[in-house]
Image (cartoon, rainbow, N blue to C red):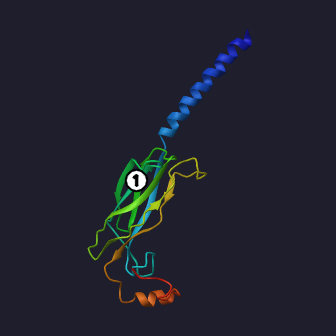
Amino acid sequence: MYNALITPGFCFLSLLGSAYTVVAEDDSKFYVVGTVYCDTCRTQFITRVSELMAKAKVKLECREQEDGKVTYTVEGETDKLGVYHLLVEGDHEEEVCEVVLVESSDPDCCELDKKSHQISLTKENGISSENRIANPLGFMRKEPLAECPEVLKELGITDQDIAVV
């Protein structure tokens, strides 16, 4: 008789625990932080003469892996230090999520670097923090600054090492 009462009780508690887990996954939140800079030497990486860009627009998009259908989008803008903060709702374990540049705030530095940067937005990857740090994103100047050859030389980079785009 005692076992007849305990077994259904455990089954009920198991169901209740499963229901709670589903709700908890739906409440996942992530905070994506990154920077946007002006690539003043057109090298597609940050140098000492790169400038952080205020009021630049970025977008985070998550897509289904199989068909590329967009499942989630959030946009943001950089602060005066060139830093953006995006709040992302939900766990996106089965999706590919990328941060891309949308719009520059500087007409002299507005060429899009076509690269996007993937970011993992799931709690199932071993990262315990809700914070995610994205790689820096850069717009390129129309023409490199005059001091760029000197900057590249300081880095030990020659014309043969890098093709300035």
Q: Quadrant of the N terminus?
A: top right
**Looking at the image, which residue is at 52% across and 34% down?**
22
Looking at the rendered structure, the number of numbered marks drawn on it comes to 1
Q: Please give left or right for residue 108 compared with residue 35 in the image.
A: left
Write down the quadrant of residue 59 in the picture: bottom left
Q: What is the three-letter code of the residue carrying label 1?
A: Glu
In the depicted structure, whether residue 114 falls above or below residue 162: above
Q: Residue furthest right?
A: 2
Q: Position of residue 153 (x, y in %)?
A: 49, 90
Q: Position of residue 103 (x, y in %)?
A: 30, 64
**Looking at the image, which residue is at 58% across and 47% down?**
124
In the depicted structure, whether residue 81 falls above or below residue 146: above
Q: Quadrant of the C terminus?
A: bottom left
Q: Please give left or right for residue 68 compared with residue 24 in the image.
A: left
In the depicted structure, whether residue 149 falls above or below residue 44: below
- Frontmost residue, 165 versus 99: 165
In the depicted structure, whether residue 161 falls above or below residue 123: below
Write down the quadrant of residue 44 in the picture: bottom left
**Looking at the image, which residue is at 41% across and 82% down?**
164
Q: Position of residue 19 (x, y in %)?
A: 54, 29
Residue carrying label 1:
61
Element type where label 1 sits in the image = strand
Q: Residues within 10 Å of mark 1 (few under 14, many from 20)?
A: some
Q: Residue furthest front?
A: 67
Q: Position of residue 100 (x, y in %)?
A: 39, 61
Q: Residue furthest top?
A: 1
